[in-house]
Structures are given as C-alpha cells and as structure tokens.
Image (cartoon, rainbow, N blue to C red):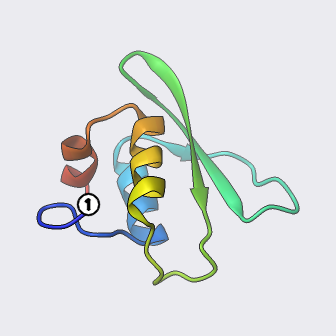
Amino acid sequence: MGGNYPPLNRRQVEKILKALGFTPKPRRSGTTHTQREGYAGGKRRIVTVDDLGGANKTYGRPLLASMIRQAGVSKEQFYKNL
C-alpha cells in the first residue's frame, strides 16, 4: 500500500473496524475467518476478516482493499481510524 497506507495486520484491522462501529458476529466453526457487522452509508455491512495464521502477518493489498470495500468507507477513512 505504501506511503500513507502501510500494510496492516489482523489486530490493526479489527481495531479500525471497532472504531468504525463494527461488532463481531458469532464465529462459524471450521473456518479461519471472522466477520464484523456494522453500518456505513446507511447500509448494513459485513466485513470478513481472515485470521492469517498469526497476529503479526500483514494482509496483501488486494485482501485489504476488499475489506475496505466491504466496510463501505474510503481508504482514507479506514486508515484514519488506525
């Protein structure tokens, strides 16, 4: 992501989503993904967050862009909540 948009790990993404008002949904068994539910732009949004297999591993650009898109906010708004 570079510059003002560095790579993020799972904890950072969860912190951002919490700041944006997203709350965890119950975890489904047999998956490494969790979901966060919230509202943005007047719409209910579900963001799927991959566990990555470690707290310090960072998300690749396409996966991070997908989570930002799912959250319904701009990249600037997302990173502002870091």
Measuring 68% from the left and 59% from the top, which residue is drawn there?
33
Viewer-side residue, 19 vs 2: 2
User: In the displayed image of the protein, which residue is found farthest to the right?
Assistant: 30
Viewer-side residue, 74 vs 2: 2
- Which residue is label 1 attached to? 82
Q: Position of residue 76 (x, y in %)?
A: 18, 45
Mark 1: which amino acid?
Leu
Q: Is residue 8 above or below residue 28?
A: below
- Along the horizontal axis of the image, is 50 left or right of 66? right
Q: Position of residue 53 (x, y in %)?
A: 64, 80
User: In the displayed image of the protein, which residue is found farthest to the top?
Assistant: 42
Q: Quadrant of the N terminus?
A: bottom left
- Along the horizontal axis of the image, is 78 left or right of 45? left
Viewer-side residue, 14 vs 8: 8
Measuring 19% from the left and 67% from the top, which residue is drawn there?
2
Q: Is residue 30 above or below residue 43?
A: below
Dot 1 crowding, Cα within 10 Å, few <14, some 14–19, many 20+: few
Q: Tell me the element at label 1.
A: loop
Measuring 80% from the left and 61% from the top, which residue is drawn there?
31
Q: Quadrant of the C terminus?
A: bottom left
Viewer-side residue, 54 vs 18: 54
